[in-house]
Amino acid sequence: MPELPEVETVRRGLAPVMEGARIVAATLNRPDLRWALPENMAARLTGTQVLALRRRSKYILADLSSNETLIIHLGMSGRMLISGQMLGQFHHDHPAPAKHDHVILDMDNGTRVTFNDARRFGAMDLAPTATAQSHWLLRDIGPEPLGNIFNETLLAARLKDRKTPIKTALLDQRIVAGLGNIYVCEVLHRARISPHRLAGQITASETSALVTLIRQVLTEAIEAGGSSLRDYRQTDGELGYFQHTFRAYDREDQPCLTPGCPGTVQRTQQSGRSSFWCATCQS
C-alpha cells in the first residue's frame, strides 16, 4: 500500500494540472470502489474548481469551490494518471479507456486525471470542507511526521508505558500519520532499534533519534519519488526510486549495510507483516 512518500509524490504530480482548474466532466464507470461512491458524485464534481490539493497521512484531499472536499485513498493498487498535458513540445494524448479506469476527471485545461485501481481497495468520498478533518477516515489520525507538531516530546508521550513492539506502535496511525511497513523498517534499522523492543522501553535519546530519522527517511523517499515495489507509479506513469536505497526492507539474507556490522538482514513476522532487521546491530 502506498505510504506517505508515495501519496505526497502523487499529490505533487497532480497539483500543477488540478489546482486552479475546473472539472468540466466527471465520469464514474462503476458505483463503488472499496466502498460505495458518494451519492450523485459525478454531478457534485462537475463544474467545480479545485482550490487546493492537500495530503493528510495517506489521503489526498481536493478542496473544491462547492465547499466540499474530495477525499482520495489509493488503496493497494490505485493510480492517479494524467494525460493530455503539454510537456515541452510534446503533447500526451488521452489513452484509450482501460479496464480498471474507475473515475475520470476531465479538466478545463485539457488534462484528464484517471483513477485506475485493479484491486479496488481504493476509496473516494465527499465531505464538507469545513468539517473534513472530522470525517471518519481522518478524525483519529495522529500528527503529520513532517509537520511542526511532531517532536520528541510528543512521540515520547505517545510511546510511554506502551507494551506493544515499537514496530507496531509506529505503524499505528493514531500515534503518527502516514508511516507504513517499508519506512518503519528503514527508520528502525538506521536507529539501530530492534522492531521487537517494547515501545515503552524506548529511551529519551532514542526517541529523539527516531523523530530525526523519520523526517530524514520520509524526505529522502519523497525526493526519490517514493518506492515502487508492485503497483505504485507516479502520475506520469514513472516508477519511484527509493527502493534502490533500502537498507533493510526486502533485503532478507543480505549483508547489513550499517558500517562495521558483520550481520545479515533477517525477516520475521509481526502482526501479520514482515519485519526486516539486523539482530546484530539492532537491539
Image (cartoon, helix red, strand yellow):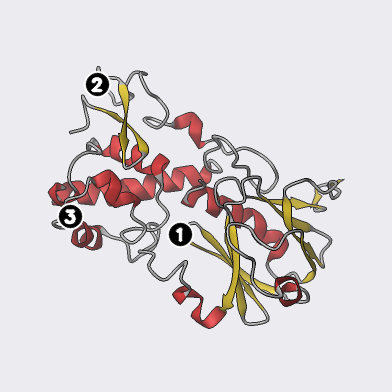
Provide residue 135's location: percent of width, then percent of height. 48, 73
Determine the residue positioned at 50% across, 29% down.
Answer: 244
In the rendered structure, find residue 57 and report the number of the disc placed on it: 1
Residue nearest the viewer, comparing 175 with 98: 98
Q: Earlier in the sequence, mark 3 or mark 1?
A: 1
Residue nearest the viewer, comparing 263 with 253: 253
Q: Secondary structure at mark 2?
A: loop
Q: Badge 2 is on which residue? A: 261
Q: Secondary structure at mark 1?
A: loop
**Residue 160, quarter of picture:** bottom left
How far is mark 1 from mark 2, CA to CA?
Answer: 34 Å
Please rate how many residues cluster around mark 2, counting C-alpha atoms within 10 Å: few if below 14, some from 14 to 19, many from 20. few
> Relative to residue 179, is residue 231 depicted above or below?
above
Q: Badge 3 is on which residue? A: 162
Of marks 2 and 3, the one in the foreground: 3
Q: Earlier in the sequence, mark 1 or mark 2?
A: 1
Left or right? Give the position of 161 relative to 5: left
Left or right? Give the position of 216 relative to 55: left
Please rate how many residues cluster around mark 1, counting C-alpha atoms within 10 Å: few if below 14, some from 14 to 19, many from 20. many
